[in-house]
Amino acid sequence: MRFPGYGSDAVTVREVGEFGVIARINAGRKQGPGVLLGPGDDAAVVAAPDERFVVTTDMLVQDRHFRLDWSSGHDIGRKAIAQNAADVVAMGATPSAFVVSFGCPPETPIDFVTDLADGMWAEAERAGASIAGGDVVSAPLLVISVTAFGDPAGREPILKSGARPGDIVAVAGLLGWSGAGFALLHGGVEPEHFRCVDTSRFADVIAVHKVPQPPYEEVLTLPDTIRITALTDVSDGLLADVGHIAESSGVAVDLDSAALRDPVLEVIADAVGANALDWILTGGEDHAFAATFTDAVDLPAGWVRIGRVTEGSGVTVDGIARNGLTGWESFA
């Protein structure tokens, strides 16, 4: 297995050993208030201030969820934490702790593992949490499994089932940028056309594909006077994830394509022979937040109105149902 950027003489995890790896990735780390006991014992102790916590887990597999020729260890580490932290925040909870299991081949450079851990810690701290512990094993390729814990802080979880007809649909964060970044990295939709594209012009978009930027604060700092009736992390694609809200709530959602337009994505779509709206609706891995608000609310800064909840079922765009896949499907 090749690790771009690391020479053939790089010190490997085989040479360092399991406990050497664990010691190295934990050295100098400072636990946050959500972790009462961190690495070093048989298990961690995680705080549950209101006698409960939100918990979620997610997994990344090499060449399915990330590629070593595209992403650094730091990028991959941040992505692994971000997609879990976003799920916790999508329940209205504040991330408090993460537990990470990591599998890698024995020839993996130890510096790569350190970069990966640094990325995980950077994103965990951005989310206001820390990494409480985990496991390291030998595996034929890189596999990362993260379990995230969150503190509801005395609030009821925000579910997907609370949307009601008349609610506003709004989004915080970038939609479609991850899909566009993937297209740029992959070589576009029309290779002959793509050869003329200067991808350096779109470095910011490519960066969003490598490292999602969930806008945690847009959810966690909402004043109590603003009530979200339903909330989800947009990870599989806007159509798919808003569709989960519609199904869980027993309502229909109509999205406004004009409100979803993104001039940056339209320039890239023209360059690579794609449709910008397709990225926005079905691209996946955006890790933005889609929510429904009562109609009376003035949307806070950072949130953009993109549609409305109505009677019925399913999701339409400008009143029209779209055919085909609505987003990411693990077994497609």
Image (cartoon, rainbow, N blue to C red):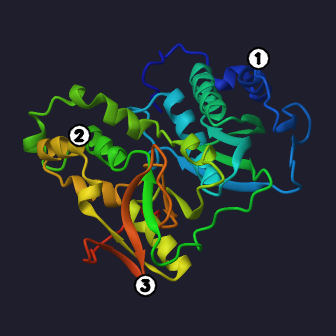
Q: Nearer the viewer, residue 82 or 153?
A: 153
Where disc 3 sits, the SS reads loop
Q: Quadrant of residue 102?
A: top right
Q: Is residue 140 visible?
A: no
Q: Residue tagged by mark 1?
A: 28
Q: Residue tagged by mark 3?
A: 311
Q: Determine the residue positioned at 70% across, 46% down.
A: 94
- Indicate which disc residue 264 carries: 2
- Relative side of 317 to 129, left or right: left
Between the C-alphas of marks 1 and 2, the distance is 41 Å
Q: What amino acid is labelled 2 in the image?
A: Val
Q: Measuring from the top left, give residue 286's x and y in whole percent.
A: 43, 49
Q: Nearer the viewer, residue 215 or 204?
A: 215
Q: What amino acid is labelled 1 in the image?
A: Gly
Q: Nearer the viewer, residue 106 or 202?
A: 202
In the picture shown, does residue 227 fall above or below 139?
below
Dot 1 or dot 3, earlier in sequence: 1
Q: Determine the residue positioned at 21% across, 27% down.
A: 201
- Indicate which disc residue 315 carries: none
Between the C-alphas of marks 1 and 3, the distance is 54 Å
